[in-house]
Image (cartoon, rainbow, N blue to C red):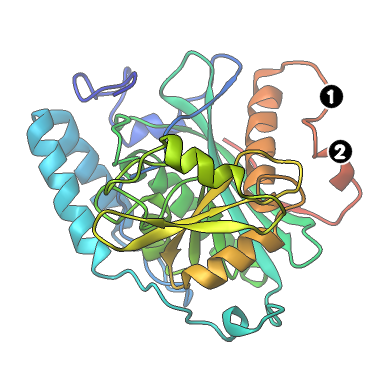
Amino acid sequence: MRAGALRGLRPPGGSVCEARRAGPTGPTERRHGNEGRTAPARGASGSDNTGRDARDCAMAREAVGRPAEETFSLWKREQARLKARVVDRDTEAWQRDPAFSGLQRVGGVDVSFVKGDSVSACASLVVLSYPELEVVYEDCRMVSLTAPYVSGFLAFREVPFLVDAVRRLREKEPCLMPQVLLVDGNGVLHHRGFGVACHLGVLTDLPCVGVAKKLLQVDGLENNAQHKEKIQLLQARGDSFPLMGGSGTILGMALKSHDHSTKPLYVSVGHKMSLEAAMRLTLGCCRFRIPEPVRQADIRSRDYIRRTLGVPGPPAPGRERFRNYPLTSCCGD
């Protein structure tokens, strides 16, 4: 458990809901971990999120006033309820096409923290054209994450703000809605089979893929000598091996995403997509080791924090090349 544990959840100077408007106080810091906070949302059909914020705030208030054990129990029940809605097969025609014909927009999300501050962060959503992988939309917002970081429950801390970003895009620029989201985290490769990629996918009703940089050691999976030997056998871009849990279930795949990378990505199903299609899409989005939608969301969230703080310096690496590309932006506090 990291800073911001279940003790003392109430944000200084305001309610849980009001704390979302707070700003940063220092340089950026990347978060650690690859999991699960809830906020009910409607589907991708364009319907609104009536009642979502009220439920989100109610759950946050319950976390503030409850003992840790009761909060964990509440979160586990909510994960189980939402997990029943996960679809682990292809639902769109483009997913079944070898060349992804019909896929035009791919989204990526990220949350970057202010260094030394476990509450202030920037939540970002970017949309890239496919297969060009050029950024056509970005949304960066400063947020305050008042729920604690607890392994296995990352979504209860971060997902509400990402759902908000998807909602803003759906309302303001529906023609730029992504057809799939890539998430820096896990999907069904999770302690209870419902990681942040599943959580976000269910709440937005969008196909979602979990792409983690580190192995989450669950269901007997271990980053041991045997696992490292398998990694050594990944010689070329696209090489992979299944992540078979002790239960006999394939929870995901380890993927070599770039010829010059010695570390694999860990790909798992989030929602409305098969593992095979998730693997092909992840590879198709990689210019470097990290898929470009996730990479650009990370770059732009950290760059937004720097600009908001007034820290001088050039644009973050990877941003300058898109300076002259047509871009719709929805950035602000």
Q: Where is residue 184 in the image (x, y as percent from the top left)?
A: 52, 45
Name the residue carrying label 1.
Answer: 314
* Circle 2/circle 1 CB separation < 8 Å: yes
Nearer to the camera, 164 or 280 = 280
Residue 295 seen in render:
yes
- Is residue 307 depicted above or below 89 in this figure? above
Q: Position of residue 73 (x, y in %)?
A: 11, 43
At 37% across and 43% down in the image, what residue appears? Answer: 35
Name the residue carrying label 2.
Answer: 320
Quadrant location of residue 197?
bottom left
Q: Identify which amino acid the numbered label 2 is placed on.
A: Glu
Left or right: residue 182 versus residue 47 is right
Q: Identify which amino acid the numbered label 1 is placed on.
A: Pro
- Is residue 73 depicted above or below 44 in this figure? above
At 48% across and 29% down in the image, what residue appears? Answer: 31
Q: Where is residue 309 in the image (x, y as percent from the top left)?
A: 65, 19
Q: Position of residue 47 (x, y in %)?
A: 43, 73
